[in-house]
């Protein structure tokens, strides 16, 4: 039987247990307090015993590519070298940290964030191909500001090189591995997706872009463990006819495992950045927050546009199924096809469910590691409970932590019942670990 507390190698990196903190938005930026913000966000998970921590999507270019406000850029070696303070803090607790490298492509702030457009001179959005007609229609109707800059073949190679350079800087700063953001409407997903990729060069095969990144990472960072998400776009709206199927995802994962990737994270997502990635309740409290109404209007370009996004958010909360572990079936299919570790995340909340995915019971384990994201906003030291026999995370998947991030608010739990429950556990010392365990 495989237990949550069992160690696991990813590449040549030994992970002390099977529980990881999935990538989240840290909203740390690159200012003078960025490193301290990241330490405050991520060290509690390590101190509580998380085997692996994924630092959230970090942008590999000096401009453009940010999908949300105040994301961290890692193109500058001087800045990344300062992150050694973060990696040292994580290693002090015998945990491991991988950095997720990213670029938003069409999903960048320049597309949807009105205040950002008004305050910056971003040239537009990096695009794989001419955008789909649905986005072009949204542009004509005024919902987005679409200014695509389609990458040439040479520019694609340059971008892969940017990922490689950032990986090299990260390894020099003490990161244990690299995670590529290849879902949630990121640029890498756009290369993989038939919805976005209509190229006629070698990168018409989107896997070629990931393999070009792998080559660049090996050149700059050596044999560092390399992980990527693998998307199936099964949550795409019904009007989308071209998308990645589960069979496509299995094929992608198989090729990447053969091509040098050390682990994969299968995820069922949409072709858009929507509630398919944060399934759960409609975040009523977050949308109603009086102190955020002006920020929502500024982000979306006016109160009526913010109201339209709010209405779409409500519809999506009913559209997407909320079953815990919604990626488990895809993980199980991919695990049967590859010989590298498969990591499973997406709505996991209960320890028993996590261990059932690891052990399989029926002889068909779904994965080698399990991850949680939003529960760490509710309980930064969650592993101290789960690894010590706790039965369930406090998180209610209410999403009140996620919507305010479009207004440059940090990710934190805003649900009173959860906040009170965490406070009681803190008073009872549940999150404390003996000195010799840290």
Image (cartoon, rainbow, N blue to C red):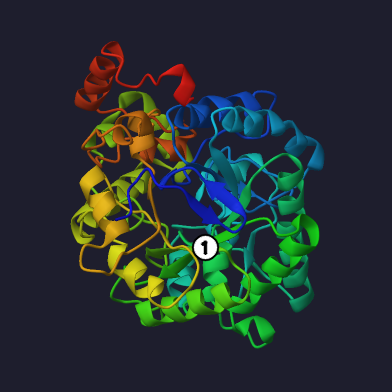
- Nearest the viewer among 287 and 345 is 345
Give the answer, above or below, for where 191 lies relative to 312.
below
As helix, strand or loop, the secondary structure at mark 1 comes to strand
In the picture, residue 288 is in which quadrant?
A: top left
Q: Nearer the viewer, residue 393 or 430?
A: 430
Q: Residue at 43% of width from left, 63% of height from top?
A: 342
Specify few, some or many for label 1: CA neighbours under 10 Å numbering under 14, 14-19, or 20 or more. Answer: many
Q: Quadrant of the N terminus?
A: bottom left
For the point 44% across and 65% down, which residue is it?
138
Side of 240 where 144 appears, left or right: right
Of residues 26 and 376, the one nearer the viewer is: 376
Q: Residue 397, how many percent across, how many down?
A: 25, 42
* 99 lies left or right of 194: right
Position of residue 421 measured from the top left corner of the image (x, y, whole percent) = 22, 22
The location of residue 49, given as percent across then percent down, is 44, 33
Residue 285 visible to the viewer: yes
**Looking at the image, residue 88 lies above or below residue 344:** above
The residue that label 1 is drawn on is 263
> Which quadrant of the structure image shows residue 289?
top left
Q: Is residue 159 visible?
A: no
Work out which residue is located at the far bottom of the displayed protein and give it: 200
The residue lying toward the viewer, choosing from 374 and 319, is: 374
């Amino acid at each position: 039987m495989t237990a949550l507390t069992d160690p696991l190698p990813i590449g040549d990196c030994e992970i002390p247990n099977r529980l990881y903190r999935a990538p989240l938005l840290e909203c740390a930026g690159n200012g003078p307090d960025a490193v301290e913000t990241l330490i405050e966000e991520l060290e509690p998970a390590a101190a509580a015993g998380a085997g692996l921590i994924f630092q959230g999507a970090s942008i590999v270019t000096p401009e453009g590519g940010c999908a949300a406000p105040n994301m961290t850029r890692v193109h500058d070696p001087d800045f990344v070298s300062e992150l050694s303070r973060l990696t040292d803090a994580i290693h002090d607790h015998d945990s491991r940290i991988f950095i997720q490298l990213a670029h938003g492509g069409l999903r960048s702030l320049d597309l949807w964030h009105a205040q950002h457009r008004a305050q910056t001179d971003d040239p537009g959005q990096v695009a794989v191909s001419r955008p789909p007609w649905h986005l072009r229609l949204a542009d004509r109707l005024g919902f987005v500001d679409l200014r695509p800059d389609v990458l040439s073949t040479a520019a694609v190679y340059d971008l892969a090189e940017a990922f490689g350079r950032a990986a090299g800087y990260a390894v020099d700063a003490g990161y244990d591995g690299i995670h590529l953001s290849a879902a949630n409407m990121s640029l890498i997903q756009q290369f993989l997706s038939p919805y976005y990729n209509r190229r006629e060069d070698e990168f018409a095969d989107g896997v070629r872009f990931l393999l070009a990144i792998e080559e660049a990472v090996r050149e700059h960072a050596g044999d560092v463990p390399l992980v990527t998400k693998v998307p199936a776009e099964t949550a795409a709206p019904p009007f989308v006819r071209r998308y990645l199927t589960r069979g496509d995802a299995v094929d992608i994962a198989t090729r990447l495992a053969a091509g040098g990737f050390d682990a994969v994270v299968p995820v069922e997502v949409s072709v858009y950045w929507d509630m398919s990635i944060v399934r759960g309740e409609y975040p009523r409290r977050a949308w109603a927050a009086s102190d955020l109404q002006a920020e929502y209007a500024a982000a979306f370009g006016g109160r009526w546009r913010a109201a339209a996004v709010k209405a779409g958010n409500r519809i999506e909360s009913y559209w997407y199924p909320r079953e815990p572990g919604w990626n488990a079936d895809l993980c199980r299919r991919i695990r049967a096809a590859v010989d590298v570790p498969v990591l499973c995340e997406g709505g996991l909340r209960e320890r028993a469910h996590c261990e059932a995915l690891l052990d399989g019971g029926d002889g068909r384990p779904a994965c080698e590691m399990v991850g949680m994201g939003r529960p760490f906003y509710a309980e930064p030291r969650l592993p101290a409970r789960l690894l010590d026999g706790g039965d369930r995370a406090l998180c209610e998947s209410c999403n009140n932590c996620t919507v305010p991030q479009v207004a440059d608010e940090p990710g934190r739990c805003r649900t009173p019942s959860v906040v009170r429950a965490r406070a009681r556990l803190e008073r009872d010392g549940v999150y404390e670990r003996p000195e010799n365990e840290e």
